[in-house]
Image (cartoon, rainbow, N blue to C red):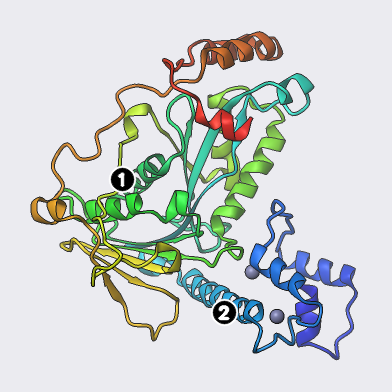
């Protein structure tokens, strides 16, 4: 930030410390957010010592790729800032949020005990829908929604994340218009399962949802209001010091953002088996589907079984039709058995549960024991999150 400021004001002398204090006095806080760095930018910086930010080479593929990447990142950021400056009160019938899954949270969170760190724990998830305007202003309809569950209830596959979107629309059931900013993570936010759900949700007879727009950031440049909120949640965990069970977690999340966050805990029946109803395409067919990775904007409209999309945030790019559903759905619509609900909790492995009870229960007050003793156990199914996160 300071380098940017110095570049814009070359005749102004200002030390790093003076700059920091001036920014702080404007009530802007400093936070180090994880260790995320843009891979495309990093590759560019290292591809050729002669090619740099100021002088990309017109004949170099890497340089051209990067120039395009940066201009896409800037266009997304500019549009996001424009949306951010629209006051929510001026149009309460249009909700603008960013949505993201918080980095994995382990329960119990007892960072001060080595045993806890080395024991396989329960994985908790927080998919947050956070207004993109200022989070500090007291505005009606401008509260972050934290959708919480853990992996003894359900996992975090496409259909699980899609289920949280249904909860979000349900929480805002009087609102007809939604704009949702997302990062480019295809597993969570950019897949045919979520897109099928969008067509489904706007075409339900009992819904007020009329338009849903998804806006995607360029990979590596995705900082959004949901990240700020997750940072507040992290601080809230630190303040609590010990988060023993799911109820403690809910309390800690609810106290983030000065206690204004809405928390919604999901039970297993809130999860539905959403699926992709994308039609099969033949590579040689005249009518192929675009690659989702190239898409920057998607819109769903009530009464329409197609979506609309753009491949950039350029306002002059015409919107194209995304006719992706299979014939059966187009002809008959979604039948009432579409996306059945979960009928039981996912459960964790018996070994993991035994291990937590043996190793960690002695570190917790008796009031927290029941949660762990009553945790559902999976039949024989593999606990896939253990593979990824243990
Ligand atoms: Zn980048
Ligand atoms: Zn180059």
Which quarter is ligand 1 in? Answer: bottom right
Confirm or deny contact between disc 2 and disc 1 (CB under 8 A): no
Q: Looking at the image, which residue sits at the far left?
A: 332
Q: CA distance from mark 2 to mark 1?
A: 38 Å
Figure quadrant of the N terminus: bottom right
Residue at the image point whose x is 43% and y is 40% from the top: 157
Disc with the residue nearer the chain's start (2 vs 1): 2
The residue tagged 2 is 68
* Residue in front for this viewpoint, 144 or 102: 102
Q: Which residue sits at x=65%, y=88%?
A: 59
Q: Is residue 123 visible?
A: no
Q: Which residue is mark 1?
A: 170
* Relative to 335, residue 313 above or below: below
Q: Residues within 10 Å of mark 2 (few under 14, many from 20)?
A: few
The quadrant where residue 23 appears: bottom right
47 on left or right of 204: right
Q: Quadrant of the C terminus?
A: top right
């Amino acid at each position: 930030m300071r380098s940017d400021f110095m570049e814009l004001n070359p005749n102004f002398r200002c030390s790093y410390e003076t700059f920091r204090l001036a920014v702080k006095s404007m009530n802007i806080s400093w936070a180090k957010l994880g260790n995320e760095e843009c891979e495309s930018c990093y590759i560019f910086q290292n591809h050729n010592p002669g090619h740099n930010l100021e002088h990309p080479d017109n004949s170099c593929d890497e340089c051209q790729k990067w120039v395009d990447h940066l201009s896409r990142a800037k266009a997304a950021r500019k549009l996001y800032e424009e949306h951010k400056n629209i006051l929510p009160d001026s149009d309460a019938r249009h909700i603008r949020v960013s949505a993201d899954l918080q980095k994995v949270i382990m329960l119990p969170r007892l960072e001060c005990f080595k045993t806890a760190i080395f024991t396989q724990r329960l994985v908790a998830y927080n998919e947050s829908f956070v207004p993109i305007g200022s989070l500090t202003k007291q505005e009606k309809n401008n509260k972050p929604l934290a959708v919480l569950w853990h992996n003894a209830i359900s996992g975090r596959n496409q259909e699980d994340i899609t289920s949280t979107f249904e909860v979000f629309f349900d929480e805002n059931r009087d609102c007809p218009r939604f704009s949702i900013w997302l990062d480019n993570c295809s597993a969570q936010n950019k897949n045919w399962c979520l897109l099928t759900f969008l067509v489904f949700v706007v075409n339900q007879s009992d819904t007020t949802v009329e338009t849903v727009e998804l806006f995607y950031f360029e990979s590596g440049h995705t900082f959004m209001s949901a990240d700020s909120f997750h940072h507040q949640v992290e601080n809230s965990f630190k303040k609590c010091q010990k988060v023993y069970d799911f109820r403690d977690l809910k309390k800690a999340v609810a106290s983030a953002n000065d206690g204004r966050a809405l928390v919604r805990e999901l039970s297993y029946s809130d999860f539905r088996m959403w699926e992709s109803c994308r039609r099969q395409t033949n590579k040689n067919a005249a009518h192929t589907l675009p690659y989702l990775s190239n898409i920057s904007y998607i819109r769903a409209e009530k009464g329409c079984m197609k979506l609309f999309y753009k491949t950039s945030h350029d306002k002059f790019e015409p919107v194209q039709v995304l006719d992706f559903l299979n014939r059966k759905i187009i002809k008959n619509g979604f039948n009432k058995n579409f996306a059945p609900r979960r009928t039981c909790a996912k459960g964790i492995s018996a070994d993991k549960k035994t291990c937590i009870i043996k190793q960690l229960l002695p570190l917790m007050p008796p009031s927290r024991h029941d949660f762990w003793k009553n945790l559902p156990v999976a039949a024989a199914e593999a606990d896939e999150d253990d593979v990824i996160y243990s």
